[in-house]
Amino acid sequence: MNVFVAGATGAIGRPLVAELVRQGHAVTGMTRLKASAQNLKELGAEVALVDALDAAAVEEAVRKSGAEAVIDQLTSLPKSPADMAAARAIDWRLRIEGGGNLRRAALACGVHRYVQQSSGFFLAPGEGLADEAVGMAVDASPEVAFHARSYAELEARVLAPGPLEGVALRYGFFYGPGTWYSPEGACADQARRQEIPIVGQGKGVWSWVHIVDAAHATVAALTAPQGVYNLVDDDPSPVNVWLPAFARSVGAPPPPQISEEQARAAAGEDAIYYGTKLRGASNARAKKVLGFGPRRLEWLA
């Protein structure tokens, strides 16, 4: 299959391109960074050196690629989550406006399938693990609600009736090589500096996915039934479980524990939401339909 990957040099983009090529797909990887083009070529992909915000250039690149499927992994994330506030505007402009350009190009070029990155951790509150029928937490704390509404918009767009077969992949928090949550990543550094505390009782439940497992499942989604899939680990875990284990695994001291009042004063309501209110997701549909087999979170193994 001819596959066009936008965001091909991001954390998920690189292993995704490698897996697509390994499985015999013809891949065009889109990036705006000249420095990243050689890496894509070494992986066996053609390169489209294009800015996603340039609608005409995006359409030309998709048409030239002869794409049958488009995978939208557009992000502009900083090297550290500590810098997310400053990066938010361009990141979401890229996802919403750049992704809109990409989707319109796919429609104009007769692409059959469109796969969209979504979130498996900003899900509406409730009892137990959330399945794909659960919507986003649009009424959460300010930053969480912003992200949730944005993901809801992306999902509504990709699943809208029309000629494109739409798939939304709700990834858990990425971990593994090239992510924030690797021994060399920004969050490991933060843990070693004791900058990631357990807030309150630490009952917020986080869903995770290894970056390579995410890539494998994304390839499987090219031929799966349309709709939404949660790509998360088998055992979503609360902060009071995963964070101390993560700290040990990267050689960090035990994380500090602070009250909700202290978290509110230091970092606002979002810190409380992440630490105490996030809801884990169920991967039952992805396991059944995609043959998804995620590894156990490595620092809990």
Image (tube, grey):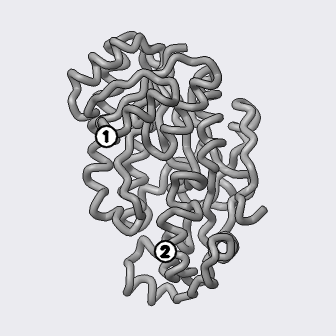
Q: Answer with left or right where residue 263 lies relative to residue 24.
A: left
Q: Answer with left or right where residue 26 lies relative to residue 63.
A: right
Q: In this view, does 48 lie above or below 233?
A: above
Q: In which quarter of the image is residue 205?
A: bottom right
**Mark 1, residue position:** 96
Q: Please, what is the three-letter code of the amino acid marked with disc 1?
A: Ile
The x, y position of residue 298, in whole percent, is: 71, 59
The x, y position of residue 54, in whole percent, is: 21, 30
Q: Would you say residue 199 is visible in this rendering? A: yes
Q: Which of 163 and 10 is in front in this view?
A: 10
Q: In this view, does 206 lie above or below 55?
A: below
Q: Residue at x 63, y 25 (%)?
A: 22
Q: In this view, does 193 lie above or below 49?
A: below
The x, y position of residue 100, in whole percent, is: 31, 31
Q: In this view, does 275 lie above or below 22?
A: below
Q: Which residue is drawn at 30% across and 42% down?
A: 94
Q: Which residue is drawn at 68% across and 55% down?
A: 129
Q: Give the position of the N terminus as an image quadrant.
A: top right
Q: Please, what is the three-letter code of the amino acid marked with disc 2?
A: Gln
Q: Give the position of the C terminus as an image quadrant.
A: bottom right
Q: Quadrant of residue 228?
A: top right
Q: Answer with left or right where residue 279 lies relative to residue 38.
A: right
Q: Nearer the viewer, residue 185 or 118?
A: 185
Q: Is mark 1 on a helix, strand or loop?
A: helix
Q: How far apart are marks 2 and 1 (CA)?
A: 30 Å
Decide which of tag 2 and tag 1 comes sooner along the chain.
1
Disc 2 versus disc 1: nearer the observer:
2
How many residues crowd mark 2 within 10 Å: few (<14), some (14–19), many (20+)?
A: some
Q: Which residue is drawn at 48% across and 80% down?
A: 195
How many residues crowd mark 1 within 10 Å: few (<14), some (14–19), many (20+)?
A: many
**Mark 2, residue position:** 190
